[in-house]
Image: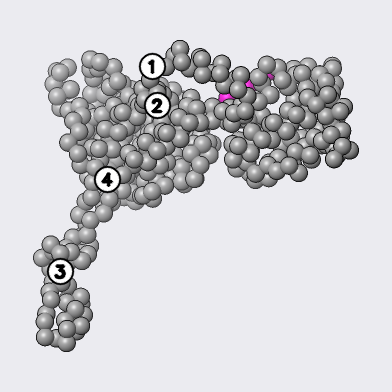
Amino acid sequence: MSDSPLSRAKTEQSGKLADNILYFARALRAAGMPVGPGAVLDAVEAVQVAQVGNRDDFYWTLHAVFVKRHEHSILFDQAFRIFFRRRGLMEKMLAAMLPETLPSAPKPPEAGAQRIQDALFAGNQREREQEVEIDARLTVSDREVLQKKDFAQMTAAEVAQAKDAIARMALPFELVRTRRLAPSRRGHIIDVRRTLRASMKAGGAVIDLKYMGPRQKEPPIVALLDISGSMSQYTRLFLHFLHAVTEREKRVTTFLFGTRLTNVTRSIRQRDPDEALAACGANVVDWAGGTRIATSLAEFNKRWARRVLGQGAVVLLITDGLERDADDTLSFEMDRLHRSCRRLIWLNPLLRFEGFEPRAKGVRTILPHVDELRPIHNLDAMSDLVRALAGAPVKGHDPKEMLRSVA
């Protein structure tokens, strides 16, 4: 094996180039990409043959070798930027091949990049000890961090724990009665077909009456999420929750709105949460922009209400209520939405502040048309929401009482 491409690369570059590509490939495999030893050898040889002279050439050379599926491009991109950013590693490697190469400025990591970073440096004990030391200064307790920390900033271990917590929160929801009938021991309608079949087993001597009752099922959930500049971080947190619920129930319809309304139900059904959120962002053109609640609700009521608000749907409206044009149109559309659904719950992250009062006109306009008002800024608030959806007596903010407080 002394004359293999990997051995020649180690000899020519004093082991630095091949070792780093090998370590980078191991990190990609730990992050979930199918990268084998053959791909490592091909990558080392490709870098040598291509004679890359800048960061982009090096990126696309490794990309051509390691990325075999389209959905792996996001993981590779985040891993590459994090791995070769630390301590000028990329510049040192390019300098070893072409000393005249100029360094390029790396971009900041995207949501979910912390999980990639953990996979990249899982084997570097010294780096891990430094990171643990920093976390120890800033953290009060593991539970408090998990309950309040943003999903995009979580480590790989915290993401796994958060997924387990969300899975526990996702069930059960309160059952509602439908018009359809189903076999029931406590029903009051005789099921003639089942009764005759049961009596035939006994030769007709005994007639065991079978009954039917109203069928119960979990109601559909329709989420309307504000993605304006002040709401984007809370929307991302809640999208993780909706992703987990959608995986299990399949009766969740999700809309994002800022200056316009966008249906992202298909995008959020992707299995990987990071890919689902990336797909949602790709379909939305007004992320972190302005807010037009009345216009977005008018479009929803006109185009989607009859399609998705049947069978006793529960509507979750997550917004801070800071509408730019809080006129009679907002009140009319909110009233129309309230009448079309079984239950309308307003999730407002501004409730995390003590002594919050509905002073803004948009907030005062929305309050009379909602059944419940709840905060939604961390896992604790999300857990209270799930218990409320399951029918538990979890006390929220009374909209009428809040209106009286500023009257």
The answer, for residue 279, to whether it is visible in the render is no
How far apart are the two marked residues, 2 and 4, measured between alpha carbons? 24 Å
Q: Quadrant of residue 322?
A: top left
Number of numbered discs overlaid on the protein picture = 4
Mark 3 vs mark 1: give the one in front.
1
How far apart are the two marked residues, 3 and 2, measured between alpha carbons? 48 Å
Query: Does the magenta segment cover residue 20?
Result: no
- Dots 3 and 4: beta carbons under 8 Å? no
Amino acid type at mark 4: Phe
Q: Which quadrant does the C terminus fall into?
A: top left
Q: Main secondary structure of the magenta part?
A: loop
Q: Position of residue 194 (x, y in %)?
A: 20, 75
Query: Does the magenta segment cover residue 106?
Result: yes
The color scheme shown is one colour
Q: Circle 4 is placed at which residue position?
A: 173
Q: Circle 2 is placed at which residue position?
A: 146
Q: Which comes sooner in the sequence, label 3 or label 4? A: 4
Q: Which mark is residue 35?
A: none
How far apart are the two marked residues, 4 and 1, measured between alpha carbons? 33 Å
Q: Start and end of the magenta stretch?
A: 105-109
Amino acid type at mark 2: Leu
Q: Quadrant of residue 340?
A: top left
Amino acid type at mark 3: Tyr
Q: Which comes sooner in the sequence, label 4 or label 1? A: 1
Mark 2 vs mark 4: give the one in front.
2
Q: Which quadrant does the N terminus fall into?
A: top right
Q: Which comes sooner in the sequence, label 3 or label 2? A: 2
Q: Circle 1 is placed at which residue position?
A: 140
Q: Circle 3 is placed at which residue position?
A: 211
